Image (cartoon, rainbow, N blue to C red):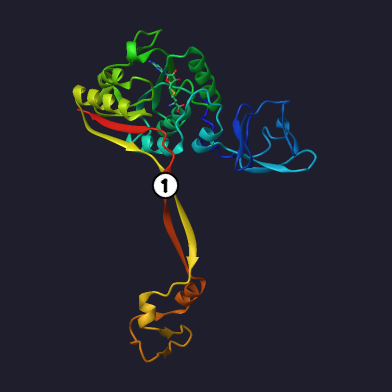
Amino acid sequence: TKNNVFSYTSDNIIREGDTLVVFESGDNIKQIVMKRNQTFQNKFGAFPHNDIIDKLQFGTKMYSKTMMGWVYILRPNSHIYTSSLAQRTQILYTPDISQVLFRLELRPGFRVVESGTGSGSLSVSIMKAIVPTGHLFTYEFNQVRSQRAIEDFQRLGFYPQNVHVTHRDVLNNGFLLKDESTGEFLVNENTIDAIFLDLPSPEKAVPHAYKVLKRGGKLCNFSPCIEQVQKAVQEMARQGFYEIKTYETLSKDFSSSHHNYQSFKQQVKPTIVTEENGNKQQDNLGDTNTGNLNKRQLKQKDKGMLVTAPKIESRGHTGFLTFAIKF
Ligand code: SAM
C-alpha cells in the first residue's frame, strides 16, 4: 500500500503522482500533482515536473527555467491542504477542524463515520489523525462529489486502505454498511468510535448515529444556525446521549504595542545592581534586597514593554459544534 503524501519518507524526495504545494506567497498557494512531461507555469516562468520528480525534496526553493523568480515546493499539511483545495461545497476550516479532532479525541486506530463528505476538507484531517490502522467511513448523497472524493483520497494515498466513500442518503438509510463481496458488516451496530455530521436536518441522522456508535463513543454535529442546533440537541437527549455541549469557534484579534512603563516596584525602589562586580549602587529610597534591576532587566526597561490587548469584536462565525457522548 502507498504511503499518504502527508507522511515523511526517509529521503523526502518528490515522486510521480505526489501532490505538492506550490507556495508563491502567503495568498498564492496551489496544489499540483506531479506528472512526467508536464510543466507548472506562473509569472516567474516555467517549472517542469521532470526537473522535480525523483530529483528534488519537499521544501526546496526552486527557480524557474528563466531564473526570473522562484517558488517553494512544499509537502502539504492539513492546514495548507484545506486552504488550497478545490471547493465543491462549503467546507470546514482549520479552527473548527482542530476543535473536532481534539474534542472527539481522534487517534490512530479509530473507526470514524462522517456525513456528508462534501469537499473532503475535514475527511483529510480525520484520516491524518487515525492512520495507519484507523478507518474513515464517509457518506455523501451527491454522486459526483462522492466520486471526486474517491479520486482525491486515492491521489493523496488514503484510498482504499484508510477510507470507504459511500454514495448514500444517510437520513433515510443510516450508516450500516456491508462489504458487497463478502456480505460482512463493515459498519455494524456499536462498532464506531466517533461520528461527525455536517448536513441539513442533522436531527434525523442522530438516531442512526446512536445505533452504530460504541458505548462511550462521541458524536459531533456542525450546524450553521442555532435553530438546527436546538433540534439536534433535543434529539440527542431523547436518544440517550449525555454531556451535550455546544461551542462556537470565533477568532479574536489582539493588537500589540511597545510602552515605556516603569513598574510600581521600580518607582519606589530604584536600586541598581551591576552584574560585573556585584557592587550595589543604592540610592536613598531603596533597600538592598528587593526591587533591584540586574543588567538584563535594565535592557528590557530600555526597550519598553510589549503590551497586547484584545480588540472588542470577534470574527469568523462559521457554525456551532455540538459534542455528545453515547450512554
Ligand atoms: N464537512 C465537509 C467538508 O469539510 O468538506 C463539507 C460538507 S458539505 C457542507 C455538506 C454535504 O452533505 C454536501 O456535500 C451534501 O451533498 C451532503 N449531504 C446533504 N444531505 C445529505 C444526506 N442526507 N446524506 C448524505 N449526504 C448529504
Between residue 14 and residue 70, name the one nearer to us: 70
> Within 10 Å of the Cα at label 1, are there few (<14), some (14-19), or many (20+) other Cα atoms?
few
| Residue 33 in the image, given as x and y percentages of width and height | 62, 28
- Asked if 57 appears above or below 301 in the picture, the reply is above
- Count of numbered labels shown in the rendering: 1
Query: In which image quadrant can residue 210 be found?
Result: top left
Residue 153 in sight: yes
- The spot of residue 320 in percent (x, y) is 35, 33
Where is residue 305 drawn, in percent x and y? 46, 68
Q: Quadrant of ligand 1?
A: top left
Image-based side of 76 in relation to 171, left or right: right
The foreground one among 38 and 289 is: 289
Pick whichever, 21 or 239, lies toward us: 239
Mark 1 — residue?
313
Quarter of the view holding residue 102: top left
Residue, far right: 66
Q: Secondary structure at mark 1?
A: strand
Please give the name of the residue rendered at 44% of the width and 63% of the height, measured from the top-left corner: 307
